[in-house]
C-alpha cells in the first residue's frame, strides 16, 4: 500500500517556501549521497564501456580526451553545485531549469533527462547481461538470452530500490568500495609490473581513424565517446530532499564524485594503454576486448572470472543509482502535476516513504526499449544516452539574484572586491569567500562573515527565510505564481 504523507523534518520549512511538503525521508548523509553519485558514474563502468570504442576511433592518443572531458565536466559540476545549493529540490535538472526559466523549459529539460536515464537503464542492464552470461556458464549467449538476463537485472534493482532505503545504501556503499579499490589496484599492478609501452605512445594514433586531420576528426569523435564516461555526477541532486543538510552535502557529492571517478579512470586507462601487448592490432580493431585481452595476457586466463564479477557488481550498482535518480524525477513531475497519472507517481510508501510507484514504472519503461531495438542494442542505447545528457544540460545563460547560499562560486564577488581595494583588502575578501565556501575550502573568518550567510557567532547557518526571499521572489516571477 502506498500513500502520500506529510512529514516534518530538516528542510521542511524551506520546501514550504516553494509550495511543497516534506513527503520523503531525509535518510541520506554525506557519505551515502556521495556513494550514490560514485555508483552512478562507476569507475569500472566508465572505463570498460568506452575504452575499446575510443581506442579504435583515435588510438592511444584518445587518452587525452579524458583530460578534455574532465575540464569541461568539472565546470558543469561547479555550476550544478551552486544550483543545488540554491534549490535543493528533488529532481535536480528539472527543478533547476524550472526555477530559472519557467515551467515550460523545466518540463523540456526534465523530460529529456527522464528519457535519457531510462535509456541508460536499458543500456547498463544489457551491458550487465553480457558479463553475467559467462559467469553463469553461458558461453555464446543469443540476443534473446541477453535480453532475459537484462530483464532479470532490472527486476533485482527494482526490488532493492523498493524494499528499503537502508538496503539500497548498503548495496551501493559496498559496491563503490569494491569498484574503487579494484580500479586503483588494477592500475597500480599494471603500471608497476606489466608495462609494455613508453609513455610516448599516448601521442600517437597508431593509424586509428584513417586519413584526415586528426584533431577535428578521430580525436574529436573520441572525446564525444569519452563524454559518456563522465556523466551522472548530478545524480546527487536528484535526491536532494532525502539528504541531510542538502545545501552543503549535495554540492560536495557533485564535485568530488566527478573528480574521484575521473582521476581513477584517467589513471587506470593510462595503465591499460601502457600494458597493451599490440597497440597496432588494437587500434585496427583486431582485438575484440582490449581490457580483457590485456589482463588475461598479463595476469593469466584465471583473471577473467573475478574481472567479470567485478564488472557485474559495478554495472549493477550503476543501474541502482540510475533507477534511483530517474524515479525521483518522476516523483517530482508528479508532484508538480506535469505528467499524466501525476498522483500515481507522487505517492510514497508508508514505512520508508519511497516513491515505489515511480520506481516500478522506471523498470517497465526501461524494459520496453528491448522490444523496440534490433540486435545492435548496446551501441544504439549508448549513443542515445550520450546525446540525451547534453540536451538536458543545455541551460540558456541567465543571471541569478545574489542569495546567502551554503555554497557558491562567488567569482564576481571576488573580482569586484579585488578591484575596489588593495592587496590586503582583496586577501580578506578571498578569505571571506572561502568562508562562504567552507565546504570545499575552509578559510579564516573575517568581519564580513555575516553578509555571507553566517550567524552572529561565525558558525554555519542555513539560509534564513528573509535571506532566501530574492531567490523565492525570482522563482515565483518565472513560474507565474
Image (tube, rainbow, N blue to C red):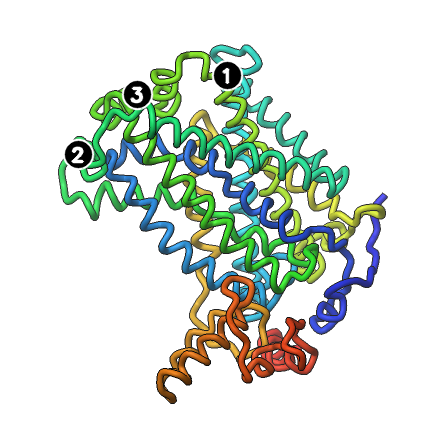
Residue holding disc 1: 305
Secondary structure at numbered mark 1: helix
> Mark 2 or mark 3, which is nearer the start of the sequence?
2
Callouts 1 and 2 close, C-beta under 8 Å: no
> Mark 1 or mark 3, which is nearer the start of the sequence?
3
Secondary structure at numbered mark 2: loop
Residue 467 falls left or right of residue 387: right
Considering depth in this image, is 168 or 443 the residue closer to the camera?
443
Task: Specify few, some or many for label 3: CA neighbours under 10 Å numbering under 14, 14-19, or 20 or more.
Answer: some
Callouts 3 and 1 close, C-beta under 8 Å: no
Looking at the rendered image, the disc whose residue lies closer to the viewer, 3 or 1, is 1
Task: Specify few, some or many for label 1: CA neighbours under 10 Å numbering under 14, 14-19, or 20 or more.
Answer: few
Tell me the tag on residue 210: 2
Q: Say above or below: 455 vs 366.
A: below
Distance between the alpha carbons at the discs numbered 3 and 1: 19 Å
Residue 430 falls left or right of residue 251: left
Look at the image and tell me whether residue 478 can be seen: yes
Tell me the tag on residue 287: 3
What's the residue at 79%, 50% (across, down)? 353
Q: Quadrant of residue 295?
A: top left
Amino acid at each position: 500500500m502506498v500513500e502520500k504523507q506529510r512529514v516534518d523534518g530538516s528542510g521542511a520549512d524551506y520546501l514550504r517556501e516553494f509550495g511543497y511538503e516534506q513527503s520523503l525521508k531525509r535518510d541520506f548523509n554525506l557519505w551515502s549521497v556521495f556513494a550514490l553519485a560514485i555508483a552512478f558514474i562507476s569507475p569500472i563502468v566508465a572505463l570498460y564501456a568506452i575504452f575499446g570504442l575510443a581506442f579504435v576511433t583515435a588510438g592511444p592518443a584518445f587518452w587525452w580526451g579524458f583530460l578534455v572531458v574532465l575540464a569541461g565536466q568539472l565546470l558543469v559540476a561547479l555550476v550544478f553545485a551552486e544550483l543545488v545549493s540554491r534549490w535543493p529540490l528533488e529532481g535536480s535538472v528539472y527543478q533547476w531549469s524550472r526555477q530559472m526559466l519557467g515551467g515550460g523549459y523545466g518540463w523540456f529539460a526534465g523530460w529529456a533527462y527522464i528519457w535519457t536515464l531510462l535509456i541508460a537503464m536499458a543500456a547498463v542492464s544489457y551491458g550487465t547481461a553480457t558479463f553475467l552470461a559467462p559467469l553463469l556458464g553461458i558461453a555464446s549467449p543469443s540476443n534473446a538470452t541477453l535480453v532475459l538476463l537484462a530483464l532479470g537485472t532490472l527486476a533485482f534493482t527494482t526490488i532493492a530500490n523498493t524494499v528499503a532505503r537502508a538496503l539500497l545504501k548498503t548495496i551501493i556503499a559496498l559496491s563503490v568500495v569494491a569498484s574503487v579499490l579494484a580500479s586503483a589496484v588494477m592500475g597500480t599492478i599494471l603500471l608497476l609490473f606489466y608495462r609494455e609501452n613508453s609513455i610516448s605512445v599516448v601521442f600517437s594514433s597508431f593509424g586509428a581513424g584513417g586519413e584526415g586531420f586528426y584533431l577535428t576528426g578521430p580525436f574529436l569523435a573520441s572525446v564525444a565517446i569519452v563524454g559518456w564516461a563522465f556523466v551522472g555526477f548530478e545524480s546527487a541532486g536528484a535526491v536532494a530532499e532525502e539528504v541531510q543538510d542538502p545545501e552543503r552535502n549535495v554540492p560536495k557529492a557533485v564535485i568530488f564524485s566527478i573528480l574521484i571517478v575521473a582521476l581513477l579512470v584517467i589513471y587506470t586507462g593510462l595503465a591499460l594503454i601502457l600494458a597493451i601487448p599490440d597497440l597496432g592490432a588494437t587500434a585496427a580493431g583486431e582485438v575484440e576486448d582490449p581490457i580483457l585481452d590485456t589482463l588475461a595476457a598479463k595476469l593469466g586466463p584465471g583473471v577473467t572470472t573475478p574481472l567479470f564479477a567485478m564488472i557485474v557488481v559495478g554495472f549493477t550498482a550503476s543501474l541502482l543509482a540510475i533507477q534511483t535518480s530517474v524515479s525521483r524525477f518522476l516523483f517530482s513531475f508528479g508532484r508538480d502535476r506535469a505528467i499524466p497519472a501525476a498522483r500515481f507517481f507522487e505517492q510514497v510508501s508508508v514505512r520508508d516513504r519511497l516513491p515505489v510507484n515511480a520506481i516500478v514504472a522506471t523498470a517497465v519503461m526501461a524494459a520496453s526499449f528491448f522490444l523496440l531495438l534490433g540486435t545492435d542494442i548496446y551501441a544504439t542505447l549508448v549513443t542515445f544516452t550520450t546525446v540525451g545528457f547534453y540536451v538536458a544540460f543545455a541551460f540558456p545563460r541567465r543571471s541569478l539574484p545574489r542569495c546567502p547560499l551554503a555554497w557558491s562560486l562567488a567569482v564576481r564577488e571576488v573580482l569586484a572586491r579585488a578591484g575596489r581595494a588593495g592587496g590586503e583588502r582583496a586577501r580578506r575578501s578571498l578569505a571571506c569567500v572561502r568562508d562562504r565556501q567552507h565546504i570545499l575550502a575552509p578559510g579564516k573568518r573575517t568581519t564580513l562573515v555575516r553578509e555571507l550567510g553566517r550567524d552572529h557567532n561565525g558558525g554555519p547557518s542555513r539560509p534564513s527565510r528573509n535571506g532566501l526571499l530574492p531567490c523565492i521572489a525570482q522563482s515565483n516571477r518565472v513560474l507565474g505564481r
